[in-house]
Image (cartoon, rainbow, N blue to C red):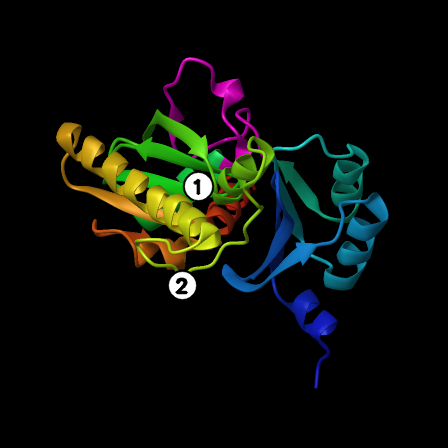
């Protein structure tokens, strides 16, 4: 019986790292399939070295929207075929926005994931993270732009940070429409408010475009999907699928 490490060496393994504003995570792909997703405690070079020694991936790709230690890139490049995602990467779509260098790597990964899953159609990708991002990829594989608004944690924290008495409330999906205390007033206002915002944005896009898919992704996508009136495709792993697609595209 082969150990996990031995099995990984026998298969084509790719590690897709996502360094976001809130969490540092990676997804392990084996022969094109996601095998596991893990949260990192930190992004120290020694931590990454340990992961590389344990999993021994053939390829790695990093999407980072933070100021990470550049030594990490050297670690990944020393132990694998490494790609740093940016607007300079070869992408399976075109950037027709005014300043491509300002587009976050996470948004590029989401677009690639949509392209891989729904090619040849209009796609509105809604990413739920530190921020909510709206990303429109048309059927000609052109990224036209989109929008950015505060995410759930940012909204909850802002109510605490910018008021004298409102507490910091943890997300709770069991909330009423009409809040009966401070906590339920906040959860209803923030979570249901976000759902109504997303529905409103989808309605606004539908007035300009027809026959487009709505892809909802991020850790809380399955919860929000239940609150939306519009038909959506919920895929929490879309970003990782996009990273894997870009890694293959740049092979």
Q: Earlier in the sequence, mark 2 or mark 1?
A: 1
Residue with the mark numbered 2: 174
- What's the magenta region? 85-106
Estimate the spatial distance between the alpha carbons at disc 2 and disc 1, rounded to whole Å.
Answer: 29 Å
Vertical placement of 52 versus 96: above or below? below
Task: Evaluate whether residue 136 shows in this view.
Answer: yes
Front residue of 43 and 155: 155
Residue 3 falls left or right of residue 189 = right
- The spot of residue 77 in percent (x, y) is 75, 41
Residue 178 falls left or right of residue 46 = left
Q: Which residue lies furthest to the right in this view?
A: 46
Residue 96 falls left or right of residue 53 = left
Disc 2 crowd rating (10 Å Cα; few below 14, some 14-19, many 20+) is few
Residue at coordinates 74% horizontally, 37% vertically from top-left? Answer: 73
- The image quadrant that residue 114 belongs to is top left
Residue at coordinates 34% horizontally, 48% vertically from top-left? Answer: 192
Task: Evaluate whether residue 119 shows in this view.
Answer: no
Residue at coordinates 28% horizontally, 43% vertically from top-left? Answer: 196
Q: Is mark 1 on a helix, strand or loop?
A: helix
The numbered mark at residue 110 is 1
């Amino acid at each position: 019986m082969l150990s996990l490490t031995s099995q990984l060496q026998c298969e084509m393994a790719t590690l897709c790292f996502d360094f976001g504003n809130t969490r540092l995570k990676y997804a392990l792909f084996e022969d094109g399939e996601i095998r596991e997703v893990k949260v990192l405690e930190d992004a120290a070079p020694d931590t990454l070295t340990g992961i590389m020694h344990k999993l021994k991936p053939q390829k790695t790709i990093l999407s980072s929207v933070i100021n990470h230690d550049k030594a990490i890139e050297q670690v990944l490049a020393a132990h694998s075929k490494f790609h740093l995602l940016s607007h300079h990467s070869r992408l399976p779509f075109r950037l027709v926005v005014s300043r491509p260098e300002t587009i976050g790597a996470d948004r590029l990964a989401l677009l690639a994931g949509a392209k891989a899953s729904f090619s040849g159609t209009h796609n509105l990708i809604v990413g739920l993270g530190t921020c909510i991002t709206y990303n429109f990829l048309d059927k000609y594989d052109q990224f036209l732009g989109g929008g950015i608004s505060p995410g759930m944690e940012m909204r909850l924290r802002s109510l605490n940070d910018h008021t004298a008495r409102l507490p910091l409330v943890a997300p709770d999906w069991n909330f009423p429409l009409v809040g009966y205390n401070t906590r339920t007033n906040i959860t209803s206002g923030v979570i249901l408010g976000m759902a109504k915002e997303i529905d409103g944005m989808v309605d606004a896009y539908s007035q300009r475009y027809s026959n487009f898919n709505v892809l909802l992704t991020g850790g809380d996508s399955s919860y929000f999907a239940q609150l939306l009136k519009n038909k959506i495709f919920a895929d929490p792993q879309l970003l990782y699928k996009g990273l894997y697609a870009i890694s293959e595209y740049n092979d």
